[in-house]
Structure formats: structure tokens, C-alpha cells
Amino acid sequence: MGKIDGKNDCVVGKLSATKVKALRAAGRYADGSGLILNVTPKGSKSWILRIQHNGKRHDYGLGSCLNVSLADAREEALRIRKMVRDGKDPRAERRKENVRSKTFREAAIEYHATHQESWKNGKHRAQWLSTLQSYAFPRLGDLALNAIDGPVILDTLDGIWLAKPETARRVRQRIGSVLDYAYSRGWRDTEAPMRSVSKGLPRQPTKRGHFAAMPYSDVPDFIRELGDRESYGRLALEALILTAVRSGEIRGAIWSEVNFDAALWTIPAERMKAGEEHIVPLSSSALQVFERAKELRIAGTEFVFPGTKLGKPLSDMTLLKILRDLSLPYTVHGFRSSFRDWAAERSALPGEVAEAALAHRISDKIVAHYLRTDFLDQRRHMMAAWGSWCTGEVANGAQRRSK
């Protein structure tokens, strides 16, 4: 066995697995044909391949002896020497191989990092990667990108496609985005096979209705149950029900929007789905909720119903959690349907008044053009009656104890 000391780089001696293990002295030990064992003064050992390429001498690291055996090092050295004979650049080829070995998880994380700043919806940014972590990474995360084909994607979606239709559709779309992104970067040989995947999935059940709504006859009892304990979340949910607004509108309410003397809450256009200012007449019941929130007001925040972090509103899950904690199958948005059903069956006022209370756009453009009123006076009467119903003053035609 020969030792290379810089003065004589061409001394050649065959190594064995036993000798490799036994060597302790620092230095470089040749195995032959340019394969060298490098031992550092601290005792670590690694493989180097020294070879001539384009008239220049190059050293290629082949890895630590802890991970690469003598047999593996010889095999890799042979492969690189053949590559050079074929006119290829070993370092360039290795870079290509490293790229090709990128996993789905790595590509998804990079896609998310690249695109998230262009997504305006903060909730979308947060959920985009978490859905893949929950439903795609267990099956696809550690797979090389080229190993992901239609059957593998179908297998990933199979367990949730019918059980969680909306989530499954999002996961399918995001898998496709990651694979197409990988293809554009040269990490994958083909685009995502999503067209064939879609053909292989069964038809999802038709969703009946948009949101599960509590029957309006049950709302008075629910309001009383909310009042058993007081929290910002419960107050916000009660205010939402009494005003028939959307979750984001009640959670984003700030004190400067509320006029207690006029009993009006003015929601600015930028916080409305339709992009138009919405004036909400506050019934005595609704005003009481805002008054109770005012008694709990925290210094340093402008929100009527603040979240746990100072200066931040309640999270969108806070209101839904109240329903789930009470084992109720309804959605927060469904209370708008409860109000609309009550208005249709219990109020003598026209349907247009209820639609105005819900801040719905008028679908008929001609009617919308000529309809200049927001029915504010009539909505005052409607919301007062709805407030009386919700708080149990009037329910099912009978007098009930006020809360």
C-alpha cells in the first residue's frame, strides 16, 4: 500500500476494507486509478477521485467512509471515469442528479415560498401548505418528483375524495401546481397528469345548500344558552345573529363605526363583500350586546370584539368553535339563512327589505338601476322584530320571558 504525500502523487497501492478501517495516520492513500482515501489529522476518512478532464486535474469528493464503502467508492469512481470518457462533465451531471432527486415535499415548500407573497388572502397562505402536509405529504412527501404518476395521486386522494370533497379538490389542485412548477424548473420530466387523474375519480355528491343553518325557531333558546357565559366570542356571535351580518364584518367591527345615539353601525365599503358601504340599524337587543362589549373594552385596541392578541380581531375559527363545543352541526354563516327564513315566514315586510338587510346585490340589473333606496326605515322595524324574536320576547306567537 502506498501513501501519497504530495511529492509522489502517482504511488499506487491497493486498499482493502480491513485496511481502510485500520488506517489512523493522517494522509492520502491511493487505491488505484485515481481513487484516494483521505484521512484527516482528526481521524475522519473520506473518498476522493483524482482525474484528468479537459487537460486539467480535478478532484471529486465521493463521500465519507461512514456512508460510502470501498466497494461503493470504486463503483462510483468507475462511473465518473466512464462519464469523462464520454465527454461529460461529472460536476454538471451530479448537479442534474441532485435536482432529479428532489422530493415532492421539497418542491411544495419551494413553490409555497415562491408564490405566497402574491396571495392577498392570509388565510389562503396559511392553509395552502398545511393541507398538503395533512393529506399529501404522508403519501407523496418523500417520493422523487418523477416517481409521482396518476395512480399514486389517485391513491393519495382516495381516502378524502368523497369524505371531504372541498378539501380533496383543493389538495388535487395544489398537487398539480407543485408538479407543474417542478416541470417548469426541470425537476420533473412531465407536467402533472391531472386530466387523467380527474377522469379516474368518482363523481362527488352534490352539495345541497351552501351552509347548514339553525332553524329560526331554535334561535331564541340558543341565544339564551350563549348568555350563560360571557366572552368576546359569544358576544360577537350574538351580535352577528342579531344584525344578520357576515363573520368577517362582525369580527372586524371597530368602535368608530358604531353610533350608539343613532343606533346605527356603518360598515365601510372596503370591509363589505359587495364593496359598498352598509348601514346596519341596531335593535335594542343588538345595542345591549355592543354595550356589554363596551364594558369589557380593552385599552389599546379599536376592535369591538378583540382577539387574544392585542390589536388583532377574533380569529375566523372562534365563532365556529362555540358551535362545535355545543355539539351543534350548524355554520356561523348559516344564521343569515335563519334570519332570511324568519323574514320570509314571520315578517310582513317585502323580501327586498330582507335582502337589503343581508347586503345582497340585486341580480336584476334593471331593477338595481332604478332602486335607489336602502330601505333603512323599514329595516329598522325588521331588525327590531328579529331582535325581539331572538331574545325570546316573541316566539312562536307566544310571549316569552325576556333575557
Image: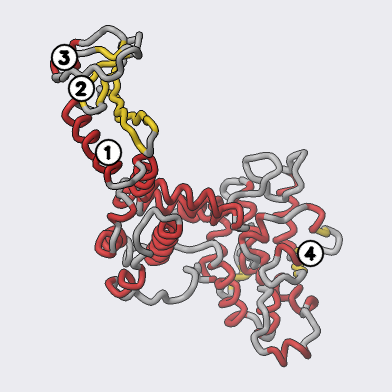
Mark 4 residue crowding within 10 angstroms, few (<14) / some (14–19) / many (20+): some
Mark 1 residue crowding within 10 angstroms, few (<14) / some (14–19) / many (20+): many
Q: Residue at x 67, y 58 (%)?
A: 250
Q: Is residue 39 above or below residue 308?
A: above
The residue labelled by disc 3 is 19
Helix, strand or loop for disc 4: strand
Rendered image: mark on residue 266: 4
Are discs 4 and 2 less than 8 Å apart at CB? no
Q: What is the quadrant of residue 220 in the picture?
A: bottom right
Asked if residue 226 shows in the view, the reply is no
Q: Residue at x 64, y 47 (%)?
A: 232
Are discs 1 and 4 less than 8 Å apart at CB? no
Mark nearer the N terminus (1 vs 4): 1
Q: What is the quadrant of residue 64 in the picture?
A: top left
Q: Is residue 134 above or below residue 209?
A: above
Residue 344 screen position, x and y as percent: 59, 82
